[in-house]
Amino acid sequence: MKELFCFLFVLLTMRTMAQLQYPVTQKETVTDDYFGTKVADPYRWLEDDNSAETNAWVQAQNKLTDAYLSTIPYRTQIKSKLESLWNYPRSGAPFKKGDYYYFYKNDGLQNQAVLYRTNELTVAPEVFIDPNTLSSEGIAALSGLSFTKDGKLCAYAVSKAGSDWSEIFVMNTETKTLLTDKINWTKFGGAAWKGNEGFYYSAYEAPDEQSKLSKKNEFQKVFYHKLGTSQKEDVIIYQDKEHPLRYFGAGLTEDQRFLVLNVTEGTSGSEIWYRDLRNPAQQDFALLVKGFDTESSVIENNGGLLLLHTNYQAPNYRVVAVDPKNPARENWKTLIPEQKEALQGVGTAGGYLFASYLKDAASKIVQYDFNGRKIRDIELPGIGTAGGFGAEKEDKDFFYTYTSFATPPAIYQYNIAAGTSALYQKTALRLKTDNLVTEQVFFKSKDGQRVPMFLTYKKGLKKDGNNPVLLYGYGGFNIPMTPGFSVSNAFFVEQGGIYAVVNLRGGSEYGEAWHKAGMLLNKQNVFDDFISAAEYLIEKKYTNKNKTAIRGGSNGGLLVGAVMTQRPDLFQVAIPQVGVLDMLRYQKFTVGWGWTVEYGSADSAAYFPYLYKYSPYHNLKKGTSYPATLITTGDHDDRVVPAHSFKFAARLQEYHRGTNPVLIRIETNAGHGAGKPTGKIIEEAADIWAFTMYHLGMQFKEQQ
């Protein structure tokens, strides 16, 4: 039977390849001069996502991709299986606001989780907000939520079609009726309530309708909105006419005393300003933390001292107390010193601090008092990821979640005074997880750096060098890859695959030093780490190069694009998703300028040669046989605009000379990923797994 499957697989592949003809993509003569280096960009026209020509190209590519995927014998079976596995109730941890506990729950296949509430956890909840009803097209999602201190009012943000743009609405929570207030054109920020009178928020001017994706977002401002008034009457609290590309976010300490303004020039580095609202003499913001050479954020106010989470003179971060009246750094008082483990963040609840550390990429939670005295380590169920350690000062308990690669999210109730956790709710799956195993291995990268990697597979795995592997990574923007359960990834493991997550440099797994080792002129370290991970798995007989697939999204899409161009021989399948693939022009679109602190900019003579050397779009080579590639993007992605994927796909199809298919899947009414409806998530997952399994030579197994 196995021999028959292999024969049919090879026969079908040969027939499909013989029939595969890529759409003819128009080329134009476009050349840029970067400091004396001429760079051709013949697919520049695909950057105009509103043109009829681009739309026709998208339709032709989607038609080809769907036709190809339809030839995979078990594509429909995989989708049906995923729908069955996905159809289970799942809830978020409850959080208390006013007289109610709120929590998100998805009954199974609902496109968006519904926000419920109850005044007693033992009483059946009621629907508070159902985002599935907010749009007739079913493409709306809740992208932000903020309550007043007493819980009487709620401001919630809604985004549509996966866009980062959102609208803010206000609800009276007692009657569940909407007020007349509505705020447009907010992005990367929510509402910070000042009592029950109004709130602070950040917003841009309305973009040109024809250039939502191609135009930079500039001159963000902070406004104050008074309830009952129109947005046109909102007062500008802060603006910077000299720096059009800075982000501004306003927030209040829990006691409403300090209005804190966080200023960034990109994705790294922050400057902090503040206003003491109890001091009528202070009408303007005053500087608390100067410059953008460090990462700092305000945790809370403690008797007039602002507590900061900062990496100033502490690459692994520490907690300090700062007197706003005397904020010079030499006067900062350390409350929680830097530790061996990287401090990811600090929450507050019940008058205590809860510090979240990473120990080899897994959670470690420590409870302190506000003076920095250690109270206890919080015992977790295992090596995984725990989150949600925060509540209000008056609360006696709160709920947090715990998950790992082999453990579905479970919710625990934490007694703050006693320091005890009690299981509140488990997740019931239609999938056995007790036969899944996760191990953490360490390997040496090209330069000798020790790098961790999590491997999840079924019990009884044989290291015979023939196991299919999906290698996943991100490696950037100070974002860690921590253990977490995914029913989609568990499906692949149940089918006999190994799901491997690499903790690449560029993340925050080992603090700011680990981040800096994978950014700017050190970015190649990230790609070397990923390549070395694949070589390690082959050397240790987990797999072989014909059984290895790679996948990543956004900055991880850049990762996949870079390594498949640098080592096309090492991988059988490549899945770059919503990737940053044109490193010479990324900064020219929407919020791309904010990434220059992570990547550098081709507008700089210092960075251009380095970016040009690894930019995926520019490093495709004519006549090269590339891995079977499925590029994915969304037509409404206003973070990493789809032009990256369009241009990369066009050139890849032009240069590729192998028998592997190189295709692009363009989701309509979808953005960068956040808020994507469950139905579309399942469809995309089914296509990705069908494509991956098919080209790794895997059979679909219905019964597990």
Image (cartoon, helix red, strand yellow):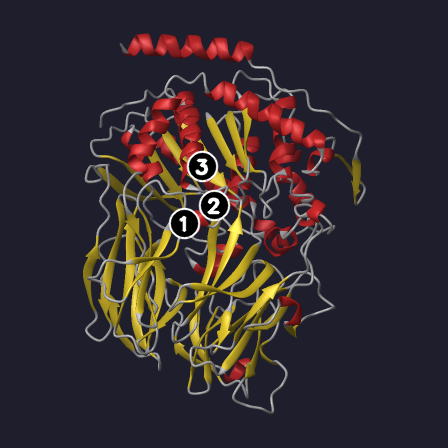
Question: Where residue 631 sits in the image (x, y, percent)?
Answer: 54, 32
Amino acid under disc 1: Met
Q: Residue at image x 41%, y 55%?
A: 509
Amino acid under disc 2: Tyr
Q: Which residue is mark 2?
A: 474
In this rendering, position of residue 445 left or right of residue 39? left
Q: Quadrant of the N terminus?
A: top left
> The residue tagged with tag 3: helix, strand or loop?
helix
* Residue 248 in view here: no
Mark-to-mark CA distance, 3 and 1: 24 Å
Q: Quadrant of residue 70?
A: top left
Is residue 192 or residue 139 the one in the foreground?
139
> The residue tagged with tag 2: helix, strand or loop?
loop
**Are circles 2 and 3 on residues that touch, CB within 8 Å?**
no
> The residue tagged with tag 1: helix, strand or loop?
loop
The crowding category of the residue bearing disc 3, from other C-alpha atoms within 10 Å (few below 14, some 14 to 19, many at least 20), is: some
Question: Where residue 381 sits in the image (x, y, percent)?
Answer: 21, 55
The mark that comes first in sequence, 3 or 1, is: 1
Q: Is 379 placed above or below 550 here?
A: below
Of circles 3 and 1, which is in front? 3
Mark-to-mark CA distance, 1 and 2: 7 Å
**Are circles 3 and 1 on residues that touch, CB within 8 Å?**
no
Residue 523 circle label: none
Q: Which residue is mark 3?
A: 680
In this rendering, position of residue 431 left or right of residue 444? left
Q: Which residue is mark 1?
A: 481
Amino acid under disc 3: Lys
**Are circles 1 and 2 on residues that touch, CB within 8 Å?**
yes
Is residue 98 or residue 351 the one in the foreground?
98
In this rendering, position of residue 325 left or right of residue 486? right
Mark-to-mark CA distance, 2 and 3: 23 Å
The mark that comes first in sequence, 1 or 2, is: 2
